[in-house]
């Protein structure tokens, strides 16, 4: 455990709910603002194609791209559960977790579980691809290029599907572990871990 993470957890470990459950800070303010801002900018860009002004579509698309760039930087410079090193799994860790999921035996993670970590990386990559191909279509070199436009639309469709899977998984995990994960991304806190939980993929990440 890093010194920053240990200090953060200890500082917040005394906070309890009315039911006596200890809550700990998991998601810092940057991660929470990034998450909801990306949701807003992505869907603003998506729905603005349905009769909305072009400038709104482009502005929200570039905002999403800038948010992802900032999140990548924070993944290396932030602390605790925000760092990629704390949750990005090695392939064998992901495969083992996927096997546990199929058997309905997956453990609770205080931070992102391995499946969620892979989904996060996928969504970040999709937003980058959407932003880059969207920018390409505004340049003289790629203006009207049907291949670029097709790739752009394909990436959008893939992202929408991934978002649906992501939300469904969050609902499933919330019910399984009796914890509102959506609300946790608002407050930044989660129920403190138990010996049966995995606090995070610490020491098992790629970085």
Image (cartoon, rainbow, N blue to C red):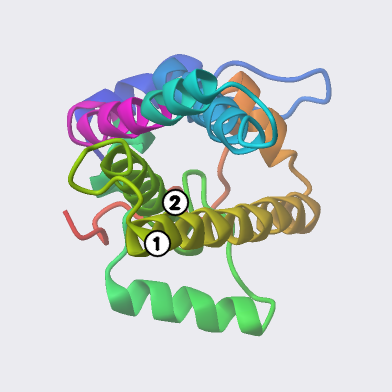
Secondary structure under the numbered disc 1 in the rendered image: helix
Q: Is residue 31 visible?
A: no
Mark sitting earlier along the chain (2/1): 2
Q: Could you give the CA–CA distance between mark 2 and mark 1, rounded to whole angstroms?
A: 15 Å
Using the image, determine if residue 162 lies above or below residue 74.
Answer: below
Residue 107: image quadrant is bottom right
Front in this rendered view, residue 33 or 187: 33
Q: Position of residue 194 (x, y in %)?
A: 58, 48
Q: Position of residue 113 (x, y in %)?
A: 49, 57
Q: Position of residue 30 (x, y in %)?
A: 40, 19
Q: Which mark is residue 123?
A: 2
Residue at (32%, 20%) from the top-left corner? 7
Q: Position of residue 150 (x, y in %)?
A: 44, 62
Residue at (25%, 58%) from the top-left corner? 205
Where does the magenta region start and end? 64-79
Secondary structure under the numbered disc 2 in the rendered image: helix
The residue that label 1 is drawn on is 151
* Residue 66 located within the stretch drawn in magenta: yes
Using the image, determine if residue 129 lies above or below residue 54.
Answer: below
Q: How many marks?
A: 2
In which quadrant is the N terminus drawn? top left
Front in this rendered view, residue 42 or 53: 53
Left or right: where 10 falls relative to 48: left
Residue at (35%, 50%) from the top-left corner? 144
């Amino acid at each position: 455990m890093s010194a920053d993470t240990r200090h953060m957890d200890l500082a917040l470990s005394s906070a309890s709910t009315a039911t006596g459950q200890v809550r700990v800070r998991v998601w810092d303010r940057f991660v929470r603002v990034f998450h909801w801002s990306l949701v807003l900018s992505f869907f603003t860009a998506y729905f603005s194609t349905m009769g909305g002004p072009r400038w709104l579509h482009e502005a929200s698309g570039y905002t999403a791209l800038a948010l992802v760039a900032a999140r990548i930087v924070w993944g290396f410079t932030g602390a605790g559960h925000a760092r990629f090193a704390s949750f990005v799994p090695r392939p064998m860790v992901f495969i083992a977790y996927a096997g546990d999921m199929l058997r309905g035996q997956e453990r609770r993670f205080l931070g992102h579980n391995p499946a969620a970590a892979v989904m996060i990386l996928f969504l970040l990559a999709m937003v980058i691809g959407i932003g880059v191909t969207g920018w390409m279509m505004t340049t003289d070199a790629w203006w009207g290029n049907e291949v670029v436009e097709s790739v752009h639309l394909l990436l959008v469709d893939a992202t929408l599907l991934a978002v649906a899977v992501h939300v469904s998984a969050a609902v499933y995990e919330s019910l399984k572990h009796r914890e509102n994960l959506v609300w946790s991304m608002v407050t930044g806190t989660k129920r403190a871990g138990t010996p049966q939980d995995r606090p995070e993929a610490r020491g098992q990440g790629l970085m």
